[in-house]
Image (tube, rainbow, N blue to C red):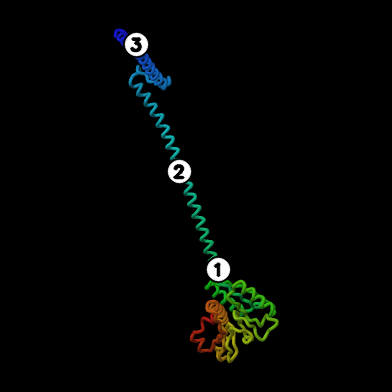
Amino acid sequence: MAEKRQKKQAVKAFEKETFSKDKEVTGVKHIEHRQDNTFSVENQFSASEKPVSNLPRDANHGSRTGKATSGHSVQKSEFNTGTEYRKNNKKKYALVIILILFIAFFSSQCMMTRTNTESKKTVAVILPYTYNKENSRILDAIRDYAHNNSIILDVWHEKSLSSNELSSIIANEEQNHAIGILLIYPENYLTQQEKHYDYNNVLAITATMQTAFSHYAAFENSPSSSYLLPVSAQVIKKIQDGKTDCIYIKNTYELGYESIQMLDTYSRNKYMKDISIPCHKVDKAAIESGELDALLTN
């Protein structure tokens, strides 16, 4: 029992001594840890940035203000950079929009021009090479109608033309989608006059070849001498003086206008008929009434 007590007391004394040593070691480590922390915190500040407790309050405040000003400058610089970036983007977007509008405008103009060109119809006109008053007024009427109805004229002036050459011209015009071919006095340039020219899309203005074409335009026969417009003043004076009973005038402008109008109608309903223009009778009563003043202006 005595030995057991001695052992217990020895164990207790050993444990007490060990505990005291451990406590001292732990305390030292804790102090060192605190010192390390203090040293690390102090090391976070540079020599110029370390807070100085001995300085007046205003000096510390100035130091903090300097730091705040520096941060504000950075934020302001970033803000300016973002603003410039947005402005540049807006300029780019504006240029892109303007470019798109220009492209759309020119594209629409090109499409409108192409549509207008495609919507126009073409009529081929073949007339004698030599100029005369009758052909001129017929051609004036044809041009006026074509201008008012968006028709393109393909005019051929021919000195001489064989039947094969005429067929070639007609075939070429059909390939170019011409709505019809108008022959002006073909008896003056056709060298080989056949008995019949079988063309459904051809209208011949003629004085002698009515039976040679499927469709023709001509003046009706007059019972007495006929004149082309404009009629000279001497002829009118003879009628007024009673030296001449009457004359008949041929309105070639009307002949040309109705001829191209017939071809235009044929392009829409594929129907064509012959045209017969009556001659206008001019006597003393008609002159004095003034009903023919529009025709006799010249």
Relative image position of residue 63 (x, y in whole percent) = 38, 24
Relative image position of residue 138 (x, y in whole percent) = 59, 79
- Residue at (38, 29) in percent of width and height: 68
Secondary structure, mark 3, is: helix
293 sits to left or right of 188: left
Residue 30 occupies which quadrant of the picture?
top left
Of callouts 1 and 3, the N-terminal one: 3
- Residue at (52, 56) in percent of width and height: 103
Nearer the observer, 187 or 76: 76
Nearer the observer, 119 or 286: 119
Whether pointer 3 and pointer 2 mark residues with C-beta atoms closer than 8 Å, the reply is no
Whether pointer 1 and pointer 3 mark residues with C-beta atoms closer than 8 Å, the reply is no
Of callouts 3 and 2, the N-terminal one: 3
Secondary structure, mark 2, is: helix
Residue mark closest to the camera, 3 vs 2? 3
The label number, if any, that marks residue 14 in the structure image: 3
Amino acid at circle 2 = Lys
The label number, if any, that marks residue 87 in the structure image: 2
Of callouts 2 and 1, the N-terminal one: 2
- Marks 1 and 3, how far apart at CA: 119 Å
Q: Which residue is mark 1?
A: 118
Check the image and name the residue furthest to the front.
1
- Marks 3 and 2, how far apart at CA: 82 Å
Quarter placement of the C terminus: bottom right
Is residue 111 placed above or below 18 in the rendered structure?
A: below
